[in-house]
Amino acid sequence: MIAKIFGLSIVLFLVFICLSTGFILDFIYFYPLFMSFVWIVGGIYFYFHWERHSPGPDVAPKLKSYPFITILIPCFNEGPNVTEVVEAASQQTYTNFEIIAVNDGSRDETGAVLDELVKQHPKLRVIHFAENQGKAMALRMGAMAARGEFLVTVDGDAMLHPNASTYLVQSMVNNPRVGAVTGNPRIRTRVSLLGKVQVGEFSSIIGLIKRAQRIYGQIFTISGVIAAFRKRALHDCGYWDLNMVTEDIDISWTMQIRHWQIQYEPCAMAWILMPETMLGLWKQRLRWAQGGAEVYFKNITRVWNWRNHRIWMLVVDFCMSTTWAFAYAIAVVLWIIGKYVPMPPDLYVPVIWPPAFWGLVLATVSLLQFATALVIESRYDHKLLRTLGWTIWYPIFFWALSLVTTMVGLPKAFFARRGKRAAWESPDRGFR
């Protein structure tokens, strides 16, 4: 609880500074502008320093060795999807592997489908749980049963590119300090407006952020849907925390605090399903927001020594983005009150949108960010540039959603009870 109070105090102090200095409007206007520049510069540097030399996802790299690996697939109510997931995993060009699917107490036909797939795929083993234990437990038990030195983890709805495992393993084979590699999820649900906007989001926001974070210091989160881990690094970190809502964010911070490197490999692709309803999207993003806050509270008192100075940027980024959400919400409240009640000059908010000039600058930089990322990412998805027109809806859908989920998720994380097992639910998989 002391760590939670300390972590919350930092955010509240930053919000108070914005209010007391009259800086609130400048902050909510210019913080997104500044971060866009940070992501653009970092993403471009990553591309020219590493990415442009890659042969691309359709050409498997040559490794100096091919150690035995385990492809680990945790499943919960994935009956309609698990067959194509196992089929994609079995078709990897990296030949020295096994597949372990963990059926985490599914209430649909997942278990029966997996039992049939075992007969068709000799590399496949299946572990059945009698009850839902949560994704972290499924991953942990799968890791314990794995014979591979490296683990490639993929969600029960994600189809691996044939060369994905080779690209994921490459960095760990070449560098013994690399504890994990996060891959490049590509969205295949593109029927609705939400689906199309998320295609642009994963490229122009998530992909670009991971590139920039890899350049500037540490990565906030491994993509839980596609990643690879060194088993020795997992053991050193105590594996996945069973009580965290987002086990992928937690293991990312834990690994980096333990001084393991995490790298981003854009050529390691997996095609995933995403929510295409507002309710499904809300549940997903609220879980992300709560999980990020839980990890922040858990680690806020552990990072303040020089050996962990590279992770300070993650703390600063979380604090500033959370402050932005609360500052914007407070500005909206003050703006509404100011329309009906006389307000002190320091608390009077005349408008909640940027002035014409700065609004134009922000819109231009946002489009530049989208265009930069989509050009970089178009080598992985040739139809990606078609989504540029849909990205104009991004601020309406996702900035507002991020603001609200942050405001709801932070208190949920603060009052969450430690020791309560984090089970999972069947998410919205979009329109097929």
Image: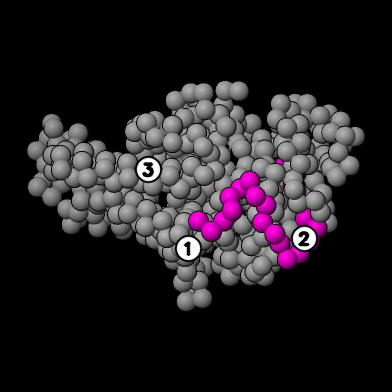
Is 53 colored magenta in this rendering? yes
Query: Does residue 419 lie above or below 179 as drawn?
Result: above
Instruction: Identify which amino acid the numbered label 1 is placed on.
Output: His
Left or right: residue 183 compared with residue 367: right
Question: At 50% across and 56% down in the image, what residue appears?
Answer: 52
Q: State the image quarter where residue 7 is shown.
A: bottom left
Q: Classify mark 2: helix, strand or loop.
A: loop
**Residue 94 percent across, percent down from the top left:** 75, 51
**Sequence-earlier tag: 1 or 3:** 1
Q: Mark 1 highlights which residue?
A: 49
Q: Give the residues in magenta.
A: 52-75
Q: Callout 1: few (<14), some (14-19), or many (20+) C-alpha neighbours within 10 Å? A: few
Q: Classify mark 3: helix, strand or loop.
A: helix
Q: Mark 3 highlights which residue?
A: 371
* Colour setup of the view: one colour
Q: Mark 2 highlights which residue?
A: 66
**Sequence-earlier tag: 3 or 2:** 2
Left or right: residue 115 compared with residue 318: right
Query: Does residue 79 lie above or below 92 as drawn?
Result: above
**Residue 417 percent across, percent down from the top left:** 57, 48
